[in-house]
Image (tube, coloured by chain):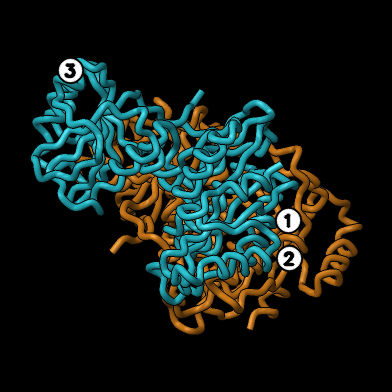
Chain colours: A cyan, B orange
Amino acid sequence: MVKPIKLQAPYLVFVGNETNPTFAKTGLGIVQWRPELCLGQLRLSENSIDLGIADLTLEQALDAGVKSLIIGVASIGGGVADEWIDTLAEAASHGIDIIAGVHKSLNDVPRLREAANISGSALINVRIPPEDLPVGKGVKRTGKRILMVGTDCAVGKKYTALALEKDMKKMGLNADFRASGQTGIMIAGLGIPIDAVVSDFVSGAAELLSPDNTDDHWDIIEGQGGIFHPGYSAVSMGLLVGSQPDAFIVCHEANRATMVGWDEFKLPSIGEVIERTVLIGQVTNPEIKCVGICVNTSRIKPEDREDYLAGLSSKYGLPAVDPIINGTEPIIHSLN
Amino acid sequence: MVKPIKLQAPYLVFVGNETNPTFAKTGLGIVQWRPELCLGQLRLSENSIDLGIADLTLEQALDAGVKSLIIGVASIGGGVADEWIDTLAEAASHGIDIIAGVHKSLNDVPRLREAANISGSALINVRIPPEDLPVGKGVKRTGKRILMVGTDCAVGKKYTALALEKDMKKMGLNADFRASGQTGIMIAGLGIPIDAVVSDFVSGAAELLSPDNTDDHWDIIEGQGGIFHPGYSAVSMGLLVGSQPDAFIVCHEANRATMVGWDEFKLPSIGEVIERTVLIGQVTNPEIKCVGICVNTSRIKPEDREDYLAGLSSKYGLPAVDPIINGTEPIIHSLN
């Protein structure tokens, strides 16, 4: 039976020499959303970014029972930087897993491959989906599912899903974030990079990502792409059909008029995304419905924010929040 | 610049020891649709299926200038059968390409790999897409495109596309079949196996498959899956959005009520497929329209066929034909 990628906690988060927070998003995300899984950070210099957790040497982390070293920064070019290799090889030689979301394979670095071979540790690239994924069956699964969908890429789908998980757990609800992209997988420690799955198996992979569960359980599924997107709609389609969501949230960035990187494509309206998602989602779940709107409002004036969200809420008859500012509680109340 | 898979003609079609026509569909298809590219067939025994073209030894084929040996049969298990290897290795050692649509790589057979390495011939698996495919851009391309879509898998999309190409060429029109699946690629000698492409790049692959062309030119694009399919709709979505078709034909099998292999899924109606295809296709081509219906009528009584097709034609206001019996000319007249 094929399973999603699963990482072993606790983690040592590797920051290397990185000084620019933009390139440390993954590390910052792991510490923000899963502090309980992080023993500490390993920085190669005093000037490296501080993720705000304990500085540990590799030896200290080993003494504390670390299971995985997660590369929490991106190198120029997306590969394994030369100055990282001593530390990574040393870690692998002690039998701890090395986890990365790099473009090239960790296995292509001979010293890492040899160290891992000898110690039996795993070199895990969260960009690489499990092998032998099945074709989607479309059979109804037990438990409940909520999917993030977007008017575009990069509108806060992952953030919204993680915030929703946190808020639902705080309210005592039974819910789990399900990661469909590499950063999400590194945060959750579990998942499938859906956009890297061969198209024949996308909905099958989505089915594996949110398997049967108890009746009261919600899978909170990270969305990908956008159903109107000229480049990525196939990913969104397979994820939607395979997830068979009972509910979905539309994620949007206020004041975005065209698709990022696809400037000649006008952004669909929230209403169009709701209508299209319901139409397509009904293939595997006739009960699918939109339960809320989550907007990144950072590009509108703070004093206009409340009116803007109230306007959306009234127009669509749905709770509308900025999850960073308001939290997601109003949406959770609309789940049954 | 990445390009579709391209095969070198003329071909020697390899039949091996196969005696069951069901397992020789590819060879039969190549001979049916591209007889001008076939020098002859190579059969390993007198009892092997006869494709109806000249029997040639490898030596005769080499004398006649063969460029590729195409494996036109499927083995049990989908691999390279042991009894084929002598012949294939001999062919490869003479510098001709070996072309297959097998599950395992031809390169995994050491004798083939060695022979090809020495002679410089290529071992081409038409199931493996080109590397470094781009993400779809959605930019309008010149020339015209017609896509086959289906109410389900295996409803005659490839046959319809090939019949349409033949009929359009007969009428003096400028048209080319564009293969999106392995058998189609072996027939056309050109194409991309869209269902084997990673989901992020499906629409980009479809864009490569029907590049800019002259204003009078029609790309006739082989369809895949079905837009309502619980397993394969991601493939259909990416192909539709990337193809930006001006026109499409709905392919259907009369009397099919549920999806083959997905029995609990009711087949969508032809009208539903038209409506959904137009909705989604408008993302990259606002002018998309349905121009005809092609039905495999083999499961209805011959005496009911005409009434059945006339009923569909009247219901949808479109020409409706069985392409095997009627040809596709009525649909071609509806193209502008």
The quadrant of the image that shows the C terminus of chain B is bottom right
Q: Position of residue A4 (x, y in %)?
A: 46, 31
| Disc 2 + disc 1, Cβ < 8 Å | yes
Please, which chain is the residue tagged with disc 2 on? B
**Which residue: 56% across, 80% down?**
B172
Q: Which residue is mark 3?
A: A94
Q: Amino acid at mark 2?
A: Ile
Between the residue at mark 2 and the residue at mark 3, the CA separation in whole angstroms equals 64 Å
Between the residue at mark 3 and the residue at mark 1, the CA separation in whole angstroms equals 60 Å
| Residue B185 can be seen in this image | no
- Between B95 and B286, the one nearer to me in the picture: B286
Q: Would you say B221 lies left or right of B133 here?
A: right
| Disc 3 + disc 1, Cβ < 8 Å | no
Both marks 2 and 1 on one chain: yes
Q: Which residue is mark 1?
A: B252
Please, which chain is the residue tagged with disc 1 on? B
Q: Amino acid at mark 1?
A: His
Q: Is residue A327 above or below residue A40?
A: below
Q: In the rendering, which numbered label is found on residue B293?
A: 2
**Which residue: 47% across, 74% down?**
A257
**Which residue: 53% across, 46% down?**
B26
